Image (cartoon, rainbow, N blue to C red):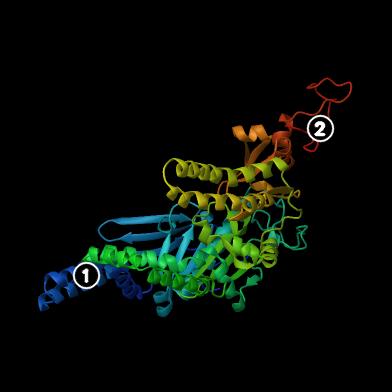
Amino acid sequence: MAPGAGGLSPQGPGGEGDGPPTGAPLRLSPKVLLTDPIRMLPSLFVPLAGVLFIGGFSPGSFVWAAMGVVGSVAFAAVRWATFTYQVVGDRLELTRSLISRSVRTIPLERIRGVDVSAPPLHRLLGISVLRIDTGAGGDDKQEGELDGVTVEEGERLKAVLLWHARARTARRVQARGADQVIGEAGPEGLADGVPARPGTDTGAGTVRHEVGDTTPERVFFVLPRKWLVYGPLSGAYLLTPFALVAGAVGLAFQLGTEFGIDRRVLVGAGEWLWEHPPFLVAALVVLILAMPVVGAVMYAVFNWDFSLRAREGYLIAGRGLITRRSVSLERRRVRGFEFVQGPAERGAGLGRAWAIVTGLGDSQTRGQLMPVAPKGIVLDVVGEAIGPIATDLRPHPPAARRRRLFRAIFPWLVVAACALAAVELWSGWWWVLGAPALLLAVLGVPLGLDRYRSLGHTYDGTRLSVRSGSLRRSQAVIEERAVVGWTLSQTWFQRRAGLLTVTAGVGAGSGGYAAIDVGEDDGPAFAAEVTPAWLTPFLVEPPSPGVRHGSPGPPGSSPPSADSANG
């Protein structure tokens, strides 16, 4: 590996000192003098256009506009000259100094991931953007960003930062006298991400490595090009034509006055289209026909050459056609995964997956483990990378089915009844509201049944899983160690039906994952099964013959088991 920032290079076991050596501060690539002014053009466009319009496109107006462009280039040059970055001891320092000096310090041991992306202009110039994730919960620039390092420098610095972040965490544990890591071994022989001595059997058929030792890269998945046809089945990409039209209309209203376009012209165009139904229908048909084509194109743009790999204690997902992005997730902070399916994806046997990670900002983008792909492949890949759920989901009681049907049908029946009353009392035009309500009530029957079939929960001794949803079916698989608390809640309707909702509090992902409408006895038993030491003492054991209810058992007896306990 090439030397690190500021003369820094990762060293193997036995070659480490108290910290990495300190070298000279480094600057970004001078090519940012091209990218920064171009990036500023959208914000300068309106002022420059205003200068030209006010000046009547005279030579003087062009001079003032040129001075604005030169000023933006000079500003970019000053920003480049006054910014440096450097690894000093156990921290990364980002320094900016002009009139005053500001230093942003990022401890290496707090680095949880490093993302490298390359927008189109950056790729053309051979530079990239490096973003550092510390789990602070803020945006990228608050955590740390180097916009304009060369591709080689970005990959080298990424490797250096991740290696030292992982090695320092491991050394801190070892300094506490942890000669052997105790706990469940994760993938690649890591327990909580801490390497053990060479030759130590992890119990998972792998061998752990010493701190700083390199492990071979493992490729879990590479997206085949022929799978790009799955893009139209994802709702996020399928509605892109309508989103583009809506964005174009909004932009026209915002910038129309700048180009001398009266808003009344735009409104008049919309009114004309509304007054000519054939053209309106034709426009809708064009948008609908464009949905699968644009969906496939957008899927390819965002997921081109998608790959999921494991290297040095990190999961690395790379993707993108126009903007290439590489995201690193520290494996010891991964607590599980979430498998999601929309209606079209379920019909075609497809799905997507995201990682459940502690302290990860923008998890819907940065935590993606698998794009839309066949369900079996997605579950196999995430099961191999993170860990599978080994048991089938347990069904929920029939009362949950009745609740799903009631909630899917009754509101629309109420609307239809109100519309029918309005027809009798006032006007027949109310059938315009009543007829769709009746149709939705009828469609609520299969929807309610499907929502019930989606419910489920289970625990296999290592991981728990909960599932719910129909239009967006989501199944979360979470490690037992990730659970930090439980919430058992009941609405008035749930109490009448003998149901409750059990939510596992997790310090990762959305913060909580719920098993909805489980039985009153099954809910507490499920929580006690996962964390028996927390809940079993609070559950009531059925009285045994000759033993008074609530009396303690014989000395040394164990608490009641979750299987025999009831709420």
**Does residue 186 appear left or right of residue 5 in this picture?**
right
Q: Which residue position is annotated with label 2?
A: 558
Quarter of the C terminus within the rendering: top right
Query: Is residue 173 shown above or below 521?
Result: below
> Tag 1 or tag 2, which sits nearer the N-term?
1
Three-letter amino acid code at the position of disc 1: Phe
> Residue placed at 77% from the left, 33% from the top?
565
Label 2 secondary element: loop
Q: Which residue position is annotated with label 1?
A: 259
> Residue placed at 56% from the left, 53% from the top?
439
Looking at the picture, how far across and down is residue 254, in whole percent?
28, 62
Looking at the picture, how far across and down is residue 51, in whole percent?
16, 69
Label 1 secondary element: helix
**Does residue 394 appear left or right of residue 147 in this picture?**
right
Furthest-right residue in this view: 546
Looking at the picture, how far across and down is residue 273, in whole percent?
34, 68
> Residue placed at 39% from the left, 76% from the top?
121
- The answer, for residue 171, to whether it is visible in the render is no
Looking at the picture, how far across and down is residue 557, in whole percent?
83, 30
Three-letter amino acid code at the position of disc 2: Ser
- The answer, for residue 362, to whether it is visible in the render is yes
User: Of the residues tagged 2 and 1, which is closer to the observer?
Assistant: 1
Name the residue nearer the viewer: 246 or 432. Answer: 432
Dot 2 surroundings within 10 Å: few (below 14), some, or many (20 or more)? few
